[in-house]
Every structure is written in structure tokens, then in C-alpha cells.
Image (cartoon, coloured by chain):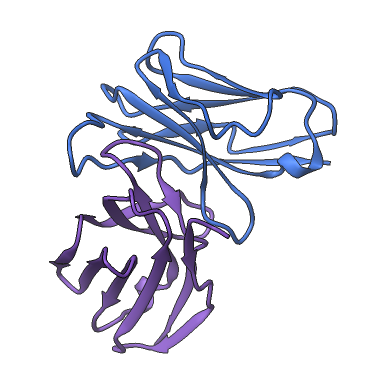
Amino acid sequence: QKEVEQDPGPLSVPEGAIVSLNCTYSNSAFQYFMWYRQYSRKGPELLMYTYSSGNKEDGRFTAQVDKSSKYISLFIRDSQPSDSATYLCAMSETSGSRLTFGEGTQLTVNP
Amino acid sequence: GAGVSQTPSNKVTEKGKYVELRCDPISGHTALYWYRQSLGQGPEFLIYFQGTGAADDSGLPNDRFFAVRPEGSVSTLKIQRTERGDSAVYLCASSSNPGLAGVEQFFGPGTRLTVL
């Protein structure tokens, strides 16, 4: 079983929809949680970074971490066609250590 | 440029050949990471350098894979006796001060390796 599980999708939504992306994990030592966005043939770019449990909001993006359930989420409000990409969750045990990624969810936002 | 750069962008080789993949991190970044991303999968950790030394090489799949960072800047990932299963995108990332919470790993565009 993988340490991090993520539904690969694909997920297709109309423009303006609220998108919910999720990951579960099994390693209780993970303390740092991230969401990366990856466009086709590009490297991942960091969207959100959260330490331990709680919520973090940045513009249209909200990240939630529930360590008791080993479950993290990313919400995208008012989704735009430019949000179409693969979204990867990633986790690490300590700051700066190796990242363990989910499989990625492919999102398409239709105009 | 200001970002992480990787060369070549694409590499096609034959089974059994030796390849070298290069990563130029962001200037001043002390930490450098290599990941491998197979089609439809998330990146998989290979090795992490802090300065010139490998702080964590537990992700290297076998002894055909080796990486160096002799001057604490540019790094080279070396793969001997390539196999078709080595075909993937090899990603490099760097960060400025990995011990600080919230410090981001910046990724390069990757090298797409195809082993025929």
C-alpha cells in the first residue's frame, strides 16, 4: 500500500465550480503538507504549504489538514480554465526532508 | 535565469548505455533534490544533497544510479546500464534553507529520459 493515496481522476468541472481534492496517508510522522500544481511538461509548483493540522487560505485556494484522520484537502473556489492542471499532494516528516507525493489528480475546468 | 534548470530537456538512449543528467539549482540554494516521475504518477524521491554531501540517498533504486554535487552547486545524476524501466521524467529541486519551516522546494522542468 502506498504511503499517500490520491484519486487520480480525471476530474472535469464547469468554470466557476468549487473543486475539492483530497489525499489520505498512512505515515503518522508526516508533519508538513503541501499542494503542488503541475502543468503538462512542466515541473511542479507550490500552491499551498501547511504545518500540522488546521486550515490555510490563499485567495481562491484553501488547504485543510486533519492529522487525526490522516486526511488533507484542497478547495478551489470560482475555478477558472487556467486552473486546469494536475494537482499533487506532498508530505514530509521534517522541514526540508524528502517529499512523498500522491499520484496526482488531473483537473479540467471547462469554459 | 532565476529558476532551476535541467539539461538536456530530452534524452533518448539505448538499453545498456550510460547517461548523465545535469541540474543547475537556484543560485545560493544549499539543498538539492532529485525525483523521478513516471507517466501518470507523482514524483518519487531519489536523493537529497545538503551542500556537497548526500544527506539522504535512500530513494536510489539500485547501484546503477549515482549522483554527485562536487562543489555544492551543480549536480549530476548518473545512470549506468540503462533499462527500459528507467524511462521517466527526472526532476531536480532546490531550496534555500531546508531546516526552516515553510521553505519551498523549487522544481526544474525535468529531463525526459527514454530508454529504447
Rendered purple, the chain in question is A
Tally the marks: 0
Figure quadrant of the N terminus of chain A: bottom right
Percent of width and height locating residue A19: 33, 82
Image quadrant where one finds the C terminus of chain A: bottom left
A42 versus B68 height, above or below: below
Chain coloured blue: B
- Residue placed at 60% from the left, 61% from the top? B40
In the rendering, at what x and y percent does residue B98 appear? 26, 32
User: Would you identify the image quadrant in which residue A15 lies?
Assistant: bottom left
Tell me if B80 is positioned left or right of B56 in this view.
Answer: right
Q: Position of residue A29 (x, y in %)?
A: 33, 48
Of residue A42 and residue B65, the one placed in the foreground of this image is B65
**Residue at image coords 78%, 31%:** B82
Vertical order, A3 against B92 (above or below)? below
- B59 or B21: nearer the eye? B59
In the image, residue B74 sits, relative to residue A91, either above or below, namely above
Q: Is residue A63 left or right of residue A42?
A: left
Q: Residue at x 26, y 39 (%)?
A: A95
In the rendered image, the vertical position of residue A94 relative to residue A3, given as above or below = above
Pick the front one: B72 or A41: B72
Question: In x, y percent, where is residue B54?
Answer: 45, 19
